[in-house]
Image (cartoon, grey):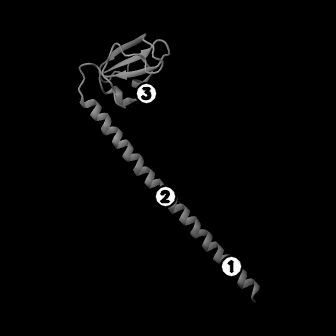
């Protein structure tokens, strides 16, 4: 999520409306909107501008004009970590599914050999 710097002339990214409400919040303040800053705890630890379109009620967050550029670097790093975590979890899940399928196939082979042995025993007395 690449946060843009506050621009009072920016229109709503959803409907293009120009009647936009905005409110500055210090780091740690959850804000008055129930939008992105409240639903994403990582945004709460940064100073931000909560914005809301008065036409369609779309809500988004922008960086204050005096914010540091490294905030977006933090977001890039978090995004990279999340992507790598998803890849690792996907590999683990794939391995577990593979093990389960292998165990199931082995169980079926053992069961088949037991049935075959039992059938041969019962039919060849």
List the single residue furthest toward the top: 19
Q: Mark 3 sits on what residue?
A: 39
Numbered mark located on residue 66 in the image: none
Cα–Cα span, label 1 and label 3: 60 Å
Q: Residue at x 48, y 18 (%)?
A: 15
Q: Residue at x 32, y 34 (%)?
A: 75
Q: Mark 2 sits on what residue?
A: 96
Q: Earlier in the sequence, mark 1 or mark 3?
A: 3
Which residue occupies the foreground of this view, 64 or 101? 64
Q: Disc 3 on helix, strand or loop?
A: helix
List the single residue furthest toward the bottom: 125
x, y percent for residue 1: 37, 32
Q: Residues within 10 Å of mark 2 (few under 14, many from 20)?
A: few
Which residue occupies the foreground of this view, 47 or 55? 55
x, y percent for residue 45: 31, 27
Q: Disc 1 on helix, strand or loop?
A: helix
Q: Residues within 10 Å of mark 3 (few under 14, many from 20)?
A: few
Q: Is residue 110 left or right of residue 62?
A: right
Are discs 2 and 3 less than 8 Å apart at CB? no
The C terminus lies in quadrant: bottom right
Against 78, residue 13 (above or below) is above
Q: Earlier in the sequence, mark 1 or mark 2?
A: 2
Q: Residues within 10 Å of mark 1 (few under 14, many from 20)?
A: few
Q: Earlier in the sequence, mark 2 or mark 3?
A: 3
Q: Mark 1 sits on what residue?
A: 116
Q: Residue at x 44, y 55 (%)?
A: 92
Q: Is residue 53 left or right of residue 69?
A: right
Against 76, residue 107 (above or below) is below
x, y percent for residue 79: 35, 39
């Amino acid at each position: 999520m690449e946060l843009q710097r506050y621009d009072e002339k920016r229109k709503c990214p959803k409907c293009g409306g120009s009647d936009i409400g905005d409110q500055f919040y210090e780091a740690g303040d959850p804000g008055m909107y129930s939008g992105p800053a409240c639903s994403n705890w990582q945004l709460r630890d940064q100073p931000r501008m909560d914005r809301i379109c008065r036409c369609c009620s779309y809500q988004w967050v922008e960086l204050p004009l005096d914010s540091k550029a490294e905030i977006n670097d933090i977001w890039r790093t978090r995004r990279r970590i999340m992507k790598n975590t998803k890849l690792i979890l996907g590999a683990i899940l794939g391995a577990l599914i593979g093990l389960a399928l292998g165990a199931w196939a082995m169980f079926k082979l053992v069961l088949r050999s037991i049935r075959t042995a039992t059938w041969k025993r019962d039919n060849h007395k």
